[in-house]
Amino acid sequence: MTDNTEHKSNVDLTEVAKFEALASKWWDTESEFKPLHDINPLRVGYINERASLKGKKVIDVGCGGGILSEAMFKLGAQVKGIDMGEAPLAVAELHKKESKLDIDYERITAEDIAEREAGKYDVVTCLEMLEHVPDPSSVIKACMKLAKPGGHVFFSTINRNPKAYLFAIIGAEYILNMLPKGTHDYAKFIQPSELNNYARHAGLEVQHITGMTYNPITKHYKLTTRDVSVNYMMHTQKPNT
Ligand SMILES: C[S@@+](CC[C@H](N)C(=O)[O-])C[C@H]1O[C@@H](n2cnc3c(N)ncnc32)[C@H](O)[C@@H]1O
């Protein structure tokens, strides 16, 4: 069996390649990236409500083509985006230039930049990325390291249970064709209790968790604390001391 993991840097090259192949469509709101565009106002609203982005120094870990990075910049944050995909970053660079936005993108892992820029960020975001890396706990530790004392750290991922398998893989990839087949690997989904443990183990305090639900009839997403059974977001904070 081929091992596509860059062990030292916690990168699964097969996962990164999936996003490289689709990168040119990143800003096409009717493409495979439609779900990310559709959920973006909800997630940036959640982050802004809880961490008040204006004037904050933010790092977006696994930023891809920059959908979240740009939205946070537009709310007044000073944003750096990092990713290991070359093509998604090239798209992010192009799009930021077209939109005349001052965002700094870099191809580097969370772990490596945490060595260089520890304690520099008011807000760290790591959305829809943990389920694509070999060791999510290592990324979570790096996110904690990047945050200033009292800094906010946000994660989002997909729960692991039969309903999540049905909605996120069978529904989204095979029935509704919202995502390419093979986008997600069920085994890499993360239960909220596991994310909670990883965060606490890294030294982060869990502040809040919310589900993000999709109604296939109305085709609308909404945030709800009552249902974290498929997609969910977690707000954590680095202690002040
Ligand atoms: C589903 S996309 C999410 C993009 C963005 N966070 C968003 O939610 O709009 C996942 C991204 O994670 C990136 N990625 C995967 N493994 C990575 C790693 N080890 N380090 C940095 N980025 C990684 C991929 O290249 C891809 O751009």
Image: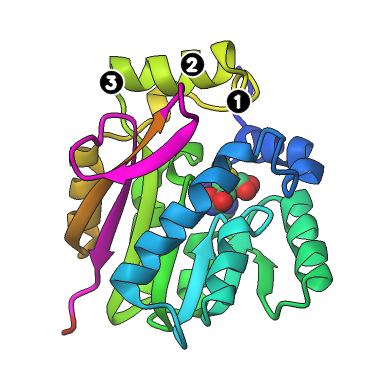
Q: As drawn, is 15 to the left or to the right of 172?
A: right
Q: Are marks 1 and 3 in contact (CB under 8 Å)?
A: no
Q: Which residues are magenta?
A: 215-239
Q: Residue furthest front?
A: 218
- The residue singled out by tag 1 in the image is 178
Q: As drawn, is 228 to the left or to the right of 241?
A: right
Q: As drawn, is 32 to the left or to the right of 139?
A: right
- Please name the amino acid that badge 1 sits on: Met
**C-alpha gap between disc 3 and disc 2:** 14 Å
Return the disc, 1 or 3, that comes first in the chain's sequence: 3
Quadrant placement of the C terminus: bottom left
Return the disc, 3 or 2, that comes first in the chain's sequence: 3
- The residue singled out by tag 2 in the image is 171
Return the disc, 2 or 1, that comes first in the chain's sequence: 2
Element type where label 3 sits in the image: loop
Residue 3 versus residue 214: which sits nearer the camera?
Answer: 214
In the depicted structure, whether residue 28 falls above or below residue 93 = above
